[in-house]
Image: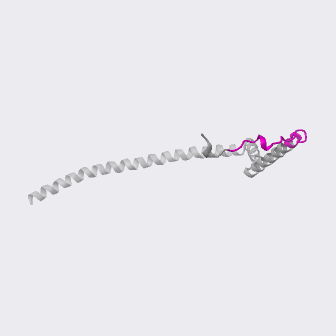
Amino acid sequence: MDDIARRVAALEKGFEKMDGKIDRLTELVNSFGLKSAERLGAIEGRLTGMEAKLDSKASSAEVRELAGKVSSIPNVWQTLAIMGGLLAGVAGLAFALTKFAEPSRAVMPAPAVSSSTLPTPTPPSAKP
């Protein structure tokens, strides 16, 4: 029994040390929670100020002018239609220029080819 009493006393002493450590940890966590709440409050205050500034900027004439410029930019389909129209126009112009710049075929007759000027084929076995 004496051995059991000694062991129980050692356990109680160890728990007293742990209770002190747990109390200190609880205090640290609570103080951190308060500091976090203060920091979050400060961040919210800054964000509110930024929102007010952005709202005032959004209502300015510069932003409205920029919105008008952005809305005048053509979208993808309009851009593709413009490029297709330009391509068709350039192709038509090139076709017209080749018809006007083509030399007349009546001025230069095609050369006559006679059978005497053509080389005669030799069989593969007759080659040296």
Tell me the magenta residue range. Answer: 97-121
Q: Between residues 85 and 124, which one lies in front from this camera angle?
A: 124
**In magenta stretch: residue 103:** yes
Count of marks, rendered view: 0
**Residue sitting at 62 percent across and 44 percent down?**
126
- Quadrant that contains the N terminus: bottom left
Farthest residue in the right direction? 106
Q: In the depicted view, which residue is nearer to us: 78 or 62?
A: 78
Left or right, 61 with respect to 98, comes to left
**Which quadrant would residue 65 be assigned to in this image?**
top right
In magenta segment, residue 120: yes
Q: Quadrant of the C terminus?
A: top right
x, y (%) of residue 12? Answer: 20, 55
Judging depth in this view, the residue of 37 and 47 nearest the camera is 47
What secondary structure do most residues of the magenta stretch adopt? loop
Q: Residue at x 48, y 46 (%)?
A: 38
Horizontal and vertical percent position of residue 23: 32, 50
- Which residue is farthest bottom? 1
Picture quadrant where residue 56 is located: top right
Name which quarter of the figure residue 99 lies in: top right
Tell me: 96 left or right of 61. right
Q: Position of residue 29 (x, y in %)?
A: 38, 49
Q: Where residue 36 sits in the image (x, y, percent)?
A: 46, 47
Q: How is the image coloured?
A: one colour
In this rendering, would 4 be left or right of 63? left
